[in-house]
Structures are given as C-alpha cells and as structure tokens.
Amino acid sequence: MKERVVTFGNHSQLTGIVTFANIQLNPSRFSVLLLNPGLLHRVGFNRFNTDLARKVQSKGISSLRFDMLGIGDSASYNTSLPYDSQAMIDIDCAIDYLLNTTSSNNCVLIGLCSGADYSHHMAVNDNRNRISGAVLLDGFAYHTLGYYLHDYFPGILNPFKILRFLYKKIILKRLSSMRQSTSILQPENTYTRTFPPKNIVINEMQTIINKGIKLLYIFSGGIPLYYNYENQFKDMFKSVDFKNNVTFRYFKEANHTYTSITQRNYLMQIIETWLVSLNNISVNI
C-alpha cells in the first residue's frame, strides 16, 4: 500500500494523506475525497476515513483524507471568514490537489453530518466538472407525515410512552424554566442541527442531478429527531426527478457515528460497492 503525507493550499497550511490506487489494477476514472465529520480530524469517525481509503485502494481508487483549517495537523483557523466559508475554500483546494496528484478526471466526495452538507454545497457550486459523485451520510432531513406517524403512533398504543412524553414536555419544561438550566435537565437535546429551507435544497438537489452527478444518501438510526423510517427520503423529495442518479439507504440499527463494528463494516461495504458501480456503470446494492 502506498500512502503519502502531503501539505497543500495557501502557504501549505492544509495537511492530509493521499492513498494511491493499486498500480496492478486499472486506475479508476475518479478519486475520492474524504471530508472531516464535524470537528474530528482526517481519520474520520471511528477511523472510518482511514479504513475506507485503504479498502477502496484495492479497487483501483485513490483518495485523499485531510484536515481543514483548525483541525488536526492543519494550520490554526485564524481568518476573518465564517468557518463554513473557509471550509468550502479548503475543500476546493483539496479537490484540485487530489485531481492533480492522482491524475484523476474527477472525484467523489464522502462526508458525514457537516461533511455531507459541504459535499452538497460543493456539488451545487462546482462549475468545472470536477465532481462526479457524492456520498452524504446523515445529510439534510425534513419531517414528513410518515415521520410523525412513526414518531407518535407507537406512543398512542403505549401508556408508558405517553407518560414519558408528558413528563418531558410539561414537568421538565417547568423545572427548567425555574432553574434556567435546560442543558442539564434535557441532555437529549444536545444534538441538534439547522437545515436550509426544504424548497431551496430541493432545487439544489435537482441542479446536482441535472449535472449528472451520482448521489448516495445514507441515514442512520442515530438521528431520530430528523429521520426515522425507511422511505422517508423518497417522501421528503418526491418532487425531485432522480433520473436514476440517486440511491438511498436507511441503517436503523446504526448510531450517528457507527460505533458498532458490524454496522460500520456494512456501511463500508455499501459505499465500496457503490463506488465500484460508478466505474462499472451498473452494480446492484
């Protein structure tokens, strides 16, 4: 296996590791850029980025995993730009470096949570045909009628869930207002995200699909506040013409960062198979 530590970007402030494709195989038409999940550094959640990079290397796919400014071994974040704006600049630099280093025609972006959000925005705004695909893990999600049915209907049949709901919504709320300490009394609310308006995401998704970019959306059971059943993705975006460019999966048993080795290996297998299908045109997953 051939890997190299690299620095790139403005004043070589960004640090990453390139995993080069197995030279005994026909190199892939694309390479893979693995993004930071939140504030985790380039190894990814539970070493997922590292493990996936080495796994797809055996399929002839090169990759880059790197640290954005302020994370891991890259330089400190000390610009006046908003963090998200700087992150997009960092990713833009990483794409150029990856394609130049691996002589790839284009790349596939893979990201969890904020990494999925950045992948979406890069795919929308890239006008140089550098992106051929994206894997978005726990990306944008919106409530549907099915979401509410799955969330509330089981409670109607279970009196203990009704009591628990009333306890959270009434008793804890009153106590928290008295003590002004909701963060302590309601720790389940620590993981929250704000998504762009749904109509904007729908239009942007259609733009990405119209470019011919392939998309793999995977949602875990670790974000029940936003996503809680198998076909929610299809219900959320029923107005979008997928044009056979979109695949989606729901791993109900997995948590947000796939701490289960079994679920993480299954996730890796799904992504690997999908990546191979981009070269082989058609592979069922």
Image: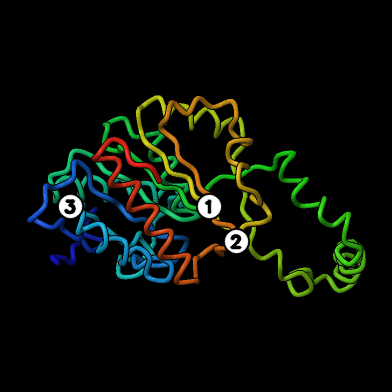
Q: Position of residue 41 (x, y in %)?
A: 38, 67
Q: Position of residue 105 (x, y in %)?
A: 18, 38
- The answer for how far apart the CA atoms under marks 1 and 2 are is 9 Å
The residue identified by callout 2 is 222
Q: Looking at the image, which residue is at 74% across and 39% down? A: 145
Viewed as shown, does residue 148 lie left or right of 65? Answer: right
The quadrant the N terminus occupies is bottom left
Viewed as shown, does residue 18 lie left or right of 235? Answer: left
How packed mark 3 is, by other alpha carbons closer than 10 Å (few <14, some 14-19, many 20 or more), is many
Q: Looking at the image, which residue is at 25% across and 57% down? A: 56
* Nearer-N-terminus badge (1/2): 1
* Nearer-N-terminus badge (3/1): 3
Image mark for residue 60: 3
- Asked whether disc 1 touches disc 2, contact meaning CB atoms under 8 Å apart, the reply is yes
**Amino acid type at image mark 2:** Gly
The residue identified by callout 1 is 138
Viewed as shown, does residue 281 lie left or right of 82? Answer: left
Q: Position of residue 87 (x, y in %)?
A: 39, 52
Note whether 257 is above or below 119 in the view shown: below
**Amino acid type at image mark 3:** Gly
- Which sits in the foreground, 6 or 76? 6
Q: Secondary structure at mark 1?
A: loop
Note whether 222 is above or below 93 in the view shown: below
